[in-house]
Image (cartoon, coloured by chain):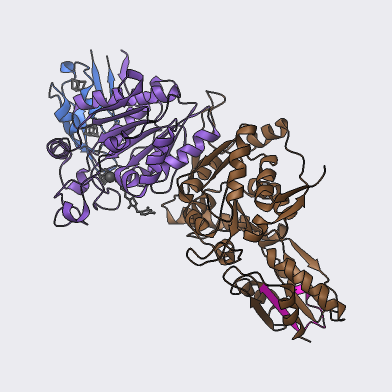
Chain colours: A brown, B blue, C purple
């Protein structure tokens, strides 16, 4: 299949439909509006459901209902709207329902601005909603990867019965790049997807005599039973941590004197800067977490070669990922951070300047 | 002959059926159920007309009517 | 001998946790009977609220979802859209539906979602111990209106049926009372109609029950019904506000 030039927001929408998503509920917000608009246009053409909900709160609760019915369902928003979804996300995690949530991040806190930012890292990876739960969080750095993550996200959600967030940003949402899509799921595959959750989801009693009573629920008043439920969730999360961390290495070698860690849009700029400093004969590597939960702690730890003097974290926030990097580095070398805030994306020249100070 | 029975496991002794019964043949038993409620009972089955008003009123769906 | 009235099949064996004499149980039974009578037990799902009705998911004998406070209409929308071959209803209290969930109920009604909503109006927050509800009557004392609801300060009770009746889409809206046996017989007809319309996928159907909270009102069950008859019914008048099936627009 040939490549199509597309905005990230449209690419993720198209890829979600191809992955078998036939239900989408959302509320408009910049910079993700192309996504909701694409869904409005395309869902009717595939006999899918598109609802512009009355709020992000309503949208995520529609997701709860549809996910509880065992169907592939997605919602999307940008930072302020994601905050509103946090109540629902906590319920979805508690009830162990599979769904996909896309966050096309913008500057915060509060209403912030509508420029690209990475300020929702804590919210996505450390909680955000109430209670003990985890979201699987995928962090694309190109339009192609953004699109590829649709099927990945749905598969992970189905496999672990857990909400999955794709944590993009306004840059990836708005920018146009050539994308190649995977073939759309066939009717037979859609049927198979629809059947995989019949043992627990809301569905008709196929055989009238064999009644079922499935409960979609996160309430448990007995403290012992609730504790067991949360412990079971954490067994599942441990399994996810063991199997599902993903990262990319760029120019990582024993010669590295500096090891960078950056994710999403920020990592693209860091790569360009590394190419520049390499021309000057300096060796800098990059670890890019492709998923920010589970976090690739081991990969970072192992990438610290004998010559590494410093681990440098670059983010479009105030340094939210630094804590995770420090956990990985275990104090072996200093960890430094530089970032831009307010929706400003740093340039390769700025990063290069920072890297040069390390030599 | 119509018959009204109360399942003591469900009854909470709220007394609403007593007021609802036009024949005034329901009372709270002196016995208590597992939850400690004096449950309702029909003390003059032969007067029951199977009008179902007790059943209709019972919030705990504790009553069965036979005819 | 033939059994002419017993626990409906659409209820599980689980005894209700409601206080003695609380009308939540009557509302549950009416809904369950209507589901049995319409033969829907294998293709219906319900959504429980946050409120005293929270455990409704244990009591109905088919698939149930427990929603976040006020969000039941959105959850029901998700279920109905995901499984259009099923029939879906919500069961909600006045705090759940008319305070925190105001947006969700208005917009589900406005979209004409093909679901039924059963609304228990007991003029109070039962579950959390008797705080003021959006339906608490003027001058009525609750734990958060200890001097009586001051309408100058906090406004008047919300009449939900009247509010929803301003929307074009809803198919059927009726307010009924559960305060006497005769009222319950009437209420049963309304519930049966809502479920039948739901079965026929006609549109959004809504039944409000004027109910009681003996515990938090501080009255014996029978006295509570008497109090509600005298105080609630004049403000929340029972009646059919919309019935497109019978030409009531
Ligand atoms: C988000 C949130 N806010 C508050 C609560 C606490 N809460 C539980 S039930 C309830 C009120 C329920 O009242 P109502 O809907 O009238 O139901 P009733 O108990 O009277 O049947 C409140 C405020 C909650 N569970 N979740
Ligand atoms: S069926 Fe009628 S007469 Fe018989 S006990 Fe019940 S209310 Fe009384
Ligand atoms: S109405 Fe029901 S619960 Fe109340 S006393 Fe009569 S049988 Fe018992
Ligand atoms: S608190 Fe009130 S509404 Fe809740 S179960 Fe008790 S009587 Fe019923
Ligand atoms: Mg209430």
Q: Position of residue A324 (x, y in %)?
A: 64, 72
Residue C80, placed above or below residue A180? above
Residue A56, placed above or below residue C84? below
Say left or right for C100 vs A269.
left
**Quarter of the rendering occupied by the C terminus of chain C:** top left
**C170 vs C201, nearest the viewer:** C170
Which residue: 32% across, 48% down? C99
Q: Is residue A144 magenta?
A: no
Can residue A197 be seen here? no
Say left or right for B49 vs C80.
left
Can residue A260 be seen here? yes
Q: Position of residue A336 (x, y in %)?
A: 67, 81
Q: Position of residue A311 (x, y in %)?
A: 72, 79
Which residue: 21% across, 51% down? C155
Which residue: 70% across, 40% down? A18
The answer to which image quadrant residue A357 occupies is bottom right
Number of marks in picture: 0
**A203 vs A288, nearest the viewer:** A288
**Quarter of the rendering occupied by the N terminus of chain C:** top left
Say left or right for C153 vs A264.
left
Say left or right for A40 vs C173.
right
Report the span colored magenta. Answer: A301-314
**C187 vs A201, nearest the viewer:** C187
Q: Is residue A312 magenta?
A: yes
Residue A290, placed above or below residue A25? below
Which residue: 62% across, 43% down? A38
The answer to which image quadrant residue A31 occupies is bottom right
Q: Position of residue C165 (x, y in %)?
A: 31, 33
**C178 vs A34, nearest the viewer:** A34
């Amino acid at each position: 299949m040939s490549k199509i030039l597309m905005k990230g927001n449209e690419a993720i929408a198209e890829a979600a439909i191809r992955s078998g998503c036939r239900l989408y509920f959302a509320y408009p917000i910049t910079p993700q509006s192309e996504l909701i608009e694409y869904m409005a246009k395309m869902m009717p053409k595939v006999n899918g459901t598109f609802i512009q909900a009355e709020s992000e709160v309503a949208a995520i609760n529609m997701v709860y209902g549809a996910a509880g019915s065992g169907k592939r369902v997605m919602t999307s928003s940008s930072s302020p709207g994601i905050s509103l979804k946090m109540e629902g996300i906590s319920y979805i995690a508690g009830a162990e329902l599979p769904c996909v949530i896309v966050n096309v991040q913008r500057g915060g806190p509060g209403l912030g601005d509508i420029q690209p930012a990475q300020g929702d890292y804590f919210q996505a990876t450390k909680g955000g909603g109430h209670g003990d739960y985890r979201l699987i969080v995928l962090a694309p750095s190109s339009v192609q990867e953004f699109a590829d993550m649709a099927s990945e996200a749905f598969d992970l959600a189905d496999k672990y019965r857990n909400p999955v967030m794709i944590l993009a940003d306004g840059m990836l949402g708005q920018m146009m790049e050539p994308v190649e899509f995977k073939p759309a799921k066939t009717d037979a595959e859609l049927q198979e997807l629809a059947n995989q959750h019949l043992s627990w989801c809301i569905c008709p009693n196929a055989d009238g005599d064999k009644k079922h009573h499935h409960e979609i629920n996160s309430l448990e008043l007995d403290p012992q039973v609730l504790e067991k439920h949360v412990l079971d969730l954490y067994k599942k999360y441990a399994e996810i941590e063991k199997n599902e961390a993903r990262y990319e290495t760029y120019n990582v070698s024993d010669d590295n004197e500096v090891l960078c860690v950056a994710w999403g849009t920020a990592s693209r700029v860091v790569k360009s800067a590394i190419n520049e400093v390499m021309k000057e004969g300096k060796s800098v590597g990059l670890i890019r977490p492709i998923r920010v939960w589970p976090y690739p702690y081991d990969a970072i730890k192992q990438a610290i070669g004998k010559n590494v003097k410093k681990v440098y974290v670059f983010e479009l926030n105030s340094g939210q990922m630094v804590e995770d990097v420090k956990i990985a580095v275990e104090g072996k070398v200093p960890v430094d951070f530089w970032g831009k805030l307010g929706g400003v994306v740093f340039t390769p020249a700025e990063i290069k300047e920072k890297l040069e100070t390390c030599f | 002959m119509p018959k009204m029975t109360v399942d003591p496991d469900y009854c909470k002794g709220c007394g609403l059926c007593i007021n609802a019964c036009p024949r005034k043949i329901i009372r709270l038993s002196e016995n208590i159920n597992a939850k400690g409620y004096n449950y309702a009972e029909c003390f003059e089955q032969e007067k029951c007309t199977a009008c179902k008003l007790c059943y209709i009123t019972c919030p705990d769906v504790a009553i069965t009517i036979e005819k | 001998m033939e059994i002419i009235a017993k626990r409906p099949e659409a209820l599980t064996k689980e005894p209700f946790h409601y206080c003695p004499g609380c009308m939540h149980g009557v509302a549950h039974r009416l809904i369950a009977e209507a589901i049995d009578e319409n033969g829907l037990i294998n293709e219906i799902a319900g959504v429980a609220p946050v409120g005293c009705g929270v455990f409704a998911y244990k009591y109905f004998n088919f698939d149930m979802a427990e929603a976040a406070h006020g969000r039941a209409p959105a959850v029901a929308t998700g279920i109905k859209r995901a499984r259009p071959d099923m029939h879906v209803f919500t069961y909600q209290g006045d705090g759940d539906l008319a305070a925190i969930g105001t947006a969700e109920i208005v917009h589900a009604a406005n979209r004409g979602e093909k679901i039924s909503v059963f609304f228990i109006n007991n003029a109070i927050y039962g579950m959390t111990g008797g705080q003021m509800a959006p339906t608490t009557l003027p001058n009525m004392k609750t734990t958060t209106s200890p001097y009586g609801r001051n309408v100058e300060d906090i406004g008047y009770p919300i009449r939900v049926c009247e509010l929803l009746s301003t929307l074009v889409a809803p198919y059927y809206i009726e307010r009924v009372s559960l305060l006497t046996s005769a009222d319950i017989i009437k209420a049963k007809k309304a519930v049966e109609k809502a479920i039948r319309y739901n079965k026929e996928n006609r549109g959004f159907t809504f039944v409000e029950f004027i109910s009681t909270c003996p515990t938090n009102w501080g009255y014996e069950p029978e006295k509570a019904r008497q109090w509600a008859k005298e105080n609630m019914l004049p403000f929340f008048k029972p009646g059919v506000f919309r019935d497109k099936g019978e030409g009531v627009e």
